[in-house]
Amino acid sequence: MANGFNVQTPFGHAMRSHFLFDPTYTSLNHGSFGTYPIPVRDRLRQIQDISESRPDVFFRYDLAKYVDAARTAIAGYLEVDAGECVFLPNATTGINTVLRSLVFEKGDVIVYFSTIYGACEKTVEYIKETTPVQSARVEVSYPIEDNDLVVQFQEKVKQLKSEGQRPKLAIFDTVSSLPGVRVPWERLVDICKQEEMLSMVDGAHGVGHIELRLGKVQPDFFVSNCHKWLYVPRGCAVFYVPERNHHLIRTSIPTSHGYEPFTKDDQEVLFNPFPGSEQSRFVKLFQFVGTSDIGPYLCIEEALKFRQEVCSGDSKIKEYCENISTEGGKKVAELLDTEVMENSEQTLMQCCLTNVKLPLKIGEGQGEIRKADAFAVVAWIAKKQTEEHNMFVPPFFHAGCLWARFSGQIYVELQDFVAAAEVLKGLCKRVEKGEYHNHNGA
């Protein structure tokens, strides 16, 4: 690292000097798009300069070596074999890759929770249009105990089997998006193994966020955005498939030069313009997936270096982020006179996200918000934060209530949560007066 950015720095506002924020911007939504420190930005630009200096040499001959080094680094971080890890632009691409690779037959069912990420649920709907598979949605209302969530999943699988259907694949999160809560995904993976189902873990909020130990848990498929919590530029996700399942992934999305069709003896081998490789078929599928800027993939090592040298390691980062998220959320709830979303086991907040109920009631009474207007209110509160206060905390509607999701991160302090609480309190009072009715939905 250059320019003095390798100096250990205390967490909180002092850490902002390593990032590129507008000095007046309050960032409490790291979970949506993430951000990355200046040394990682410098590495990204270095890679772009290298690729532009000799594009043909870079893409044809050097790219695979760079990517292999990055795969080795992220595999070590995840405690798995490098041959089981490849890179994708984002977690949604990983979900699509699995769903479009698996062969579904009549009677097969995809099981998922109602808190699934919206783009993933839409992908399931598309697959239902193009294959015989059906889906089963497990309805969940938070806060909920981990054991109750697991039981609901087990009961849904049992019900499907009793009806003569075959639950083939389950999709679930490590940490769900809205609400932002930790999911007992390890237990769900174990149940899938017991029920002889495939597990697709959406770890969009996973790498750099919570302990994973994939080598021990061994899900069938796992994808996680490195650009959210690992401090890697957008877009970069790691796609982990244990060797036992490599044969199930037939193609990248889109299909590219690494694809190897099932050939007959008399069929001509399709031409690949790139040099041969000793890597596995699975790895070769994803080495070159159309021309794009894969610079973010090659920033993995620099991001891990920053986490170690500047932040004193992963455990320190996760400890601070979870603690500031928890304490900040409680402070916001106190100032709004509401509550945080948590269960009796205190497991939902074992991550770096906290959900706080907004002081707005859903109903038909004076000052209450009609349920039909809930999403209009969400859009209005979201927009006003950025227009008038240069901050953003995602508001959302869940289980009959309006909430706000806060992200803990190494560059935030308790006073940021206090400031956000004051903004949200003022906006909620304006909502009660009906001001959101003038919102144009932009």
Image: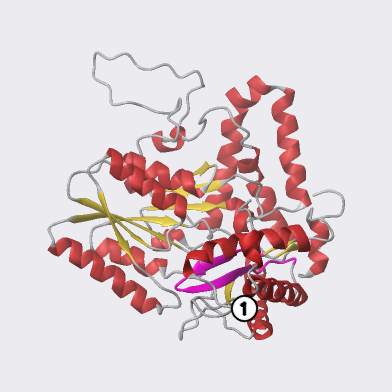
Residue 393, how many percent across, how many down?
Answer: 65, 65
Name which residue type carries label 1: Thr
Up-down relation of residue 288 to residue 151 (above or below): above
Residue 58, how many percent across, how many down?
Answer: 64, 26
Residue extending farthest to the right is: 3
Q: Which residue is tagged 1? A: 326
Up-down relation of residue 315 to residue 264 (above or below): below
- Tell me how the rendering is colored: secondary structure
Q: Is residue 415 left or right of residue 438?
A: right
Residue neighbourhood size for the residue with mark 1, other residues' Cα within 10 Å, grouped as few (<14), some (14–19), many (≥20): many
The secondary element bearing badge 1 is classed as helix
Is residue 211 visible to the viewer in this orientation of the structure? no
Magenta-tinted stretch: 393-411
Which sits in the foreground, 355 or 360?
360
Residue 176, how many percent across, how many down?
Answer: 48, 64
- Numbered circles on residues, count: 1
Where is residue 421, by image quadrant?
bottom right
Q: Is residue 399 left or right of residue 10?
A: left
- 406 falls in the magenta region: yes
Residue pictured at 65% horizontal, 38% vertical = 295
Which sits in the foreground, 423 or 28?
423
Residue pictured at 66% horizontal, 82% vertical = 336
Which sits in the foreground, 274 or 324?
324
Where is residue 230, by image quadrant?
bottom right
Up-down relation of residue 159 to residue 357 (above or below): above
Residue 119, how many percent across, how many down?
Answer: 46, 50
- 58 falls in the magenta region: no
Residue pictured at 69% horizontal, 49% vertical = 302
Residue pictured at 48% horizontal, 63% vertical = 213
